[in-house]
Amino acid sequence: MMFSYKFVRLIETHADTLAAGLEKKVMFSACTSSFRTLPSHELRRRVFEIYCHLGDWLLGKNQGDIEQRYREIGARRARQNIPLAEVIQAIVLTKENLWEFLKSEAMVDRAVEILGELELLQMLEQFFDRAIYFAAVGYQDEAERLTLQEQEIVAR
């Protein structure tokens, strides 16, 4: 637990740097191009809030709190016309940004062993995150195709 607490404090301390790094990744990723239409500070502010209060989110918030927060984020992004796949990819990038930071800052005893375990967990998470992202992309593509098909039928 002490190891985890140190990493949480490290993340919270570097929340501004982490948020700035994530903002760049999202803005320059081809998979999240719709985010470029948003005010530049919005994403950074929202992510900073999560990184800065990570301990609260991990230890103090329950599933209902997380559900409420991310339903609000999902609804806001829908109103902003950000495709679902890009919303999911932004969340994936948020987590990957955090992993990269933790790996670069891991200066503890047994660091190589711990990093090996973290790397395995990260690879598993990346696999499933990408599966989620591409399933969402496939879903969106098919939904658009079906909508166009229905419109063609009605137009006849």
Image (tube, rainbow, N blue to C red):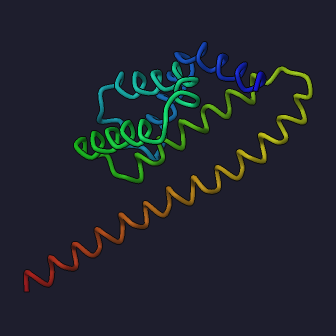
Which residue is drawn at the image coordinates 7% and 81% (left, top)? 155
Foreground residue among 154 and 11: 11
Which residue is drawn at the image coordinates 47% and 36% (left, top)? 26
| Residue closest to the far top | 13
Which residue is drawn at the image coordinates 39% and 43% (left, top)? 33
Q: Quadrant of the N terminus?
A: top right
Q: x, y percentage for residue 7?
A: 70, 23
Which residue is drawn at the image coordinates 45% and 48% (left, top)? 88
- The answer to whether residue 8 is above or below residue 132 is above
Q: x, y percentage for residue 61?
A: 49, 31
Marks counted in the figure total 0
Q: Quadrant of the C terminus?
A: bottom left
In the displayed structure image, the side of residue 113 where residue 135 appears, left or right: left
Q: x, y percentage for residue 115?
A: 82, 35
Foreground residue among 149 and 91: 91
Foreground residue among 30 and 14: 14
- The answer to whether residue 62 is above or below residue 139 is above
Q: x, y percentage for residue 128?
A: 61, 56
- The answer to whether residue 51 is above or below residue 38 is above
In the displayed structure image, the side of residue 142 where residue 135 appears, left or right: right
